[in-house]
Image (cartoon, rainbow, N blue to C red):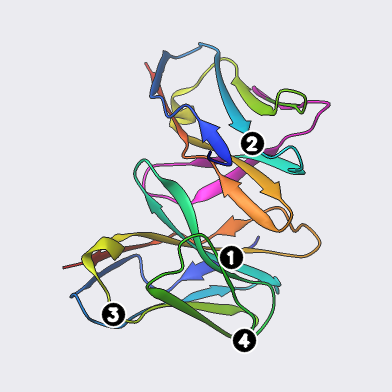
């Protein structure tokens, strides 16, 4: 079983839509959770950390559900510039585990 | 701003050649990582290092070696390149104070012919 699983998509949504991605992880001892964004042919960059209490950064909201072992990312009022691949990242001990990424295309 | 620099953006090599991929970070980070990224497989960890002259195998170390002689530099070596090592290679670093946040280089797209 993979440490981290994501729906690869693709998600194609119109501008202004709300879209949500989920990511499940297998190890209940995992301690840190993140969403990274990767543009086409570019490196991944940290988008936001994920906490049990939930955290919000503008149009982006991230949530952690430890009981069900998943993290989520909600994007409201989608912009064309949100088109990218979104990677969830989970750390367990010293190890980082990356999801394979969810592809999002926002359509005019 | 953290800067992680990979020596080449694109590289074309022939089967059997020895290949060096260099990575330098300027934030005095203790931890450095090498990944490869392939479609449908995501990022896979090849090797990592938590200190100078220290190295640990990741999930797919076969066919690779690494060198960390200086804190700021982490080199990935393909002793004898093969076509199945054609991939995007990403270097990352993180500091002990914010251990769980990784900063990536721009990547090296390696083609082995």
In magenta segment, residue A53? yes
Mark whose residue sits in front, 1 or 2: 2
Secondary structure, mark 1, is: loop
Sequence-first tag of 4 and 3: 4
Q: Tell me, for residue A26, which label it has, or none.
A: 2
- Residue positioned 77% across, 28% down in the render: A66
Earlier-in-chain disc, 4 versus 1: 1
Q: Is residue A93 left or right of residue B25?
A: right
**Neighbours of disc 3 within 10 Å: few (<14), some (14-19), many (20+):** some
Q: Residue at x 63, y 35 (%)?
A: A25
What residue would you read off at disc 3?
Answer: B80
For residue B92, which numbered disc appears in the image?
none
| Residues shaded magenta | A36-61
Side of A50 where B60 appears, left or right: left
Tag 3 secondary structure: loop
Residue B3, numbered label: 1
Give the left or right position of residue A11, taking residue B83 as reference. Answer: right
Q: Which mark is residue B70?
A: 4
């Amino acid at each position: 079983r993979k440490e981290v699983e994501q729906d690869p998509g693709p998600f194609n949504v119109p501008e202004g839509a709300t879209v949500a991605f989920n990511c499940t992880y297998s190890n209940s001892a995992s301690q840190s959770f993140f969403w990274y964004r990767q543009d086409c042919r570019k490196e991944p960059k940290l988008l936001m950390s994920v906490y049990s209490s939930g955290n919000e950064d503008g149009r982006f909201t991230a949530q952690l559900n430890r009981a069900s072992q998943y993290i989520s990312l909600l994007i409201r009022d989608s912009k064309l510039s949100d088109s990218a691949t979104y990677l969830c990242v989970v750390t367990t001990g010293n190890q980082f585990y990356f999801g394979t990424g969810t592809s999002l295309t926002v359509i005019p | 701003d953290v800067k992680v620099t990979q020596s080449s953006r694109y590289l074309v090599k022939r089967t059997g050649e020895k290949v060096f991929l260099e990575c330098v970070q300027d934030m005095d980070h203790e931890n450095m990582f090498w990944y490869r990224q392939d479609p449908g497989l995501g990022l896979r960890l090849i090797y990592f290092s938590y200190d100078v002259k220290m190295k640990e195998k990741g999930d797919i170390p076969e066919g690779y070696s690494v060198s960390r002689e200086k804190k700021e530099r982490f080199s990935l070596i393909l002793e004898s390149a093969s076509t199945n090592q054609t991939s995007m290679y990403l270097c990352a670093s993180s500091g002990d104070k914010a251990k769980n946040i990784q900063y990536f280089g721009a990547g090296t797209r390696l083609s082995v012919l």
